[in-house]
Image (cartoon, rainbow, N blue to C red):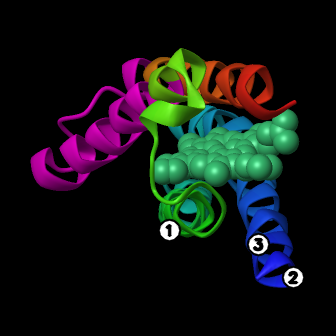
């Protein structure tokens, strides 16, 4: 059981690295794409699409491994972990809702600056809440 938990935590933290790296790279690539001519824009937008897929995979893995760890070590009782953990889950919901909005509304209707600010600040809050809960 313990080795399974450790394995999940490693995946959890690697997913955080993947999501964080994507969050840093994405605005740089999109700024370059906006300023580029038509020929350079297409490959940059393709990179942006790949980064977006990576961030969705990272978010999916974070939620999946998080739920499994919560179940394995804490019997699935989120409330027992205290207010910081409940706050963490609240910010996770904000990130998932923002991602779902861009999928449902279509990337062109979602303002990338607003999306980046919401998900970036929420990621920061999630990490702070995680450390306050477990650190
Ligand atoms: C954006 C999503 C998430 C991020 C960025 C994130 C981040 C983190 C970080 C940084 C840690 C390590 C904390 C430390 O050891 O000090 C951690 C641990 C943990 N997270 Fe997450 N997390 C996310 C989603 C979730 C979700 C959705 C759940 C559960 C429903 C969850 C449950 C846990 C658990 C149970 C641990 C480890 C507990 C332990 O070491 O005993 N996480 N998370």
Q: Residue 116's mark?
A: none
Q: Is residue 103 magenta?
A: yes
Figure disc tally: 3
Q: Earlier in the sequence, mark 2 or mark 1?
A: 2
Name the residue that disc number 1 marks: 64
Query: Which is more toward the observer, 128 or 82?
Result: 82
Near mark 3 (Cα within 10 A), the count class, few <14, some 14-19 or many ≥20, is: some
Residue at the limit of the structure toward the left, as seen here: 105
Residue 114: image location, x then y, percent: 39, 18
Name the residue that disc number 3 marks: 5
The residues colored magenta run 88-116
Q: Is residue 107 magenta?
A: yes
Q: Secondary structure at mark 2?
A: helix
Name the residue that disc number 2 marks: 3
C-alpha span from label 1 to label 3:
13 Å
- The answer to whether residue 1 is left or right of residue 123 is right
Q: Is residue 125 above or below residue 55?
A: above
Asked whether the residues under the numbered discs 2 and 3 touch, taking CB atoms below 8 Å apart as contact, a structural biologist would say yes
Residue 113: image location, x then y, percent: 45, 20
C-alpha span from label 2 to label 1:
17 Å
Quarter where residue 130 is shown: top right
Q: Quadrant of the N terminus?
A: bottom right
Near mark 2 (Cα within 10 A), the count class, few <14, some 14-19 or many ≥20, is: few
- The answer to whether mark 3 is within 8 Å of ligand 1 is yes
Quarter where residue 93 is shown: top left
Residue shown at the point (80%, 27%) measured from the top left: 131
Predominant SS along the magenta part:
helix
Choose mark 1 or mark 3, whichever is in front: 3
Residue 97: image location, x then y, percent: 27, 39
Q: Secondary structure at mark 1?
A: helix
Confirm whether residue 111 shows in the render.
yes
């Amino acid at each position: 059981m313990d080795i399974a938990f450790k394995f999940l935590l490693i995946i959890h933290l690697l997913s955080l690295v993947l999501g964080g790296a994507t969050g840093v790279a994405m605005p740089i690539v999109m700024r370059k794409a906006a300023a580029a001519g038509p020929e350079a824009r297409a490959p940059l937008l393709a990179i942006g699409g790949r980064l977006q897929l990576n961030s969705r995979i990272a978010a999916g893995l974070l939620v999946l491994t998080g739920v499994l760890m919560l179940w394995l070590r804490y019997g699935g009782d989120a409330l027992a972990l205290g207010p910081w953990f409940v706050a963490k889950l609240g910010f996770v919901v904000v990130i998932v809702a923002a991602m779902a909005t861009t999928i449902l509304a279509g990337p062109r209707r979602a303002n990338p600056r607003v999306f980046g600010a919401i998900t970036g600040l929420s990621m920061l809050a999630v990490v702070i809440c995680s450390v306050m809960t477990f650190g």
